Amino acid sequence: MMDWTDRHCRLFHRQITRHSWLYTEMVTTGALLHGDVARHLDYSDEEHPVALQLGGSDPADLAASAKLGQQWGYDEINLNCGCPSERVQKGAFGACLMAEPQLVADCVKAMRDVVDIDVTVKHRIGIDAIDSYDFVRDFVGTVAQAGCTTFIVHARNAILQGLSPKENREVPPLRYERAYQLKRDFPALEIIINGGIKTLADIDLHLAHVDGVMLGREAYHNPFLMAAFDARYYQDPATAKTRGQVIEAMLPYIRAQLAAGGPRLNSITRHMLGLMTGLPGARAFRRQLSDSKKLAQGDVGLLVEALSLMPVSC
């Protein structure tokens, strides 16, 4: 989700669900240790609970980055061992790390030694042609020995050569049973499933077998799906907002960001294009929210105008 789940996206999602955990886009250790820390780690207090997802393979660098994450107030540090992109592979991290479970364990231990918050791992069920449950079972078992108790399992193999990141989300078959088996084999661990999950019925089905569900692209493209989460999974119906109320809740934040000389308006509104997905008028809403002239002018009123185009109250 690099370049997708930035702080503006997460703040928007927080207006829809109060209790669901939010994850940052992957931030590399190099970006934190040699770049602009505030640009990568700054966020709004409303985002909690929020996890910092790190990309890296050097235990010392990951430890230093995790420590920064805790200092900035993040609630969890997540190590990405699932991204298959060639750019990530050149940095020797992401999904290719699954071939080195002891190194991943060393990375987890180094981070746990310097932070008090949870250190979790996101990974695939295999890499390339390795199509054996034993592979992911042994990976989880090795990393768990370093003290990791939460594993987020994208239930597809990662093909490191020959497929684009997009194709890696679609071509390798989903094998949810592998994640279910991990929970049976490691009942004391928290197993969270990820990959191709799009409906509340899907989520309910998976929760009969594992401890949690992570949504990625569906949460981005159809964000109002999350409006049901607080009542359905956290027993808190009081936080529910309509789509219109979500837009109204975003307006003060957007105005404050623009007044502080922050991002351009479209850097925030681009994350909101899917808010009306599935409703009559959704296309007109997206078109209005993409008005280049008003976006360039920083005209926050285009959000209200886009909402007014919806033919029914939402």
Image (cartoon, grey):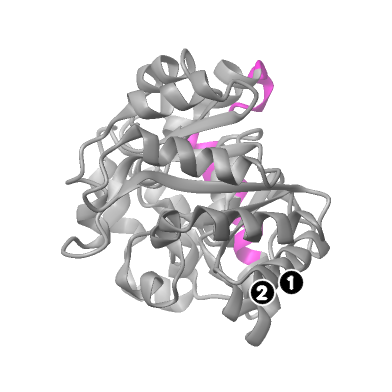
Q: Please state which of residues 289 and 158 is positioned toward the viewer in this rendering.
A: 158
Percent position of residue 181, x then y: 42, 22
Query: Is 185 contained in the magenta span?
Result: no
- Is residue 154 among the parts visible in the rendering? no
Residue under the image location 66 percent in, 55 percent down: 108
- Secondary structure mainly formed by the magenta segment: helix
Q: Please state which of residues 169 and 190 is positioned toward the viewer in this rendering.
A: 190
Residue under the image location 19 percent in, 54 percent down: 167
Which residue matches tag 2? 61
Q: Please state which of residues 206 and 63 is positioned toward the viewer in this rendering.
A: 63
Dot 2: element: helix
Percent position of residue 172, x then y: 20, 44
Q: Amino acid at mark 2?
A: Asp
Side of 265 where 161 appears, left or right? left
Q: Please state which of residues 194 and 92 is positioned toward the viewer in this rendering.
A: 92
Marks 1/2: CA–CA distance: 5 Å
Percent position of residue 107, x then y: 64, 61
Cβ–Cβ below 8 Å for labels 1 and 2? Answer: yes
Side of 269 where 23 appears, left or right? right
Percent position of residue 179, x then y: 42, 29
Q: Amino acid at mark 1?
A: Ala
When the figure is inspected, residue 112 is found, relative to residue 191, above or below; the finding is below
- Is residue 165 among the parts visible in the rendering? yes
Please count the marks in the image.
2
Q: Quadrant of residue 266?
A: bottom left
Quadrant of image for the N terminus: bottom left
Q: Which residues are magenta?
A: 235-255
Q: Quadrant of residue 278?
A: top left
Which residue matches tag 1? 64
- Per the rendering, the mark at residue 204 is none
Quadrant of image for the C terminus: top left
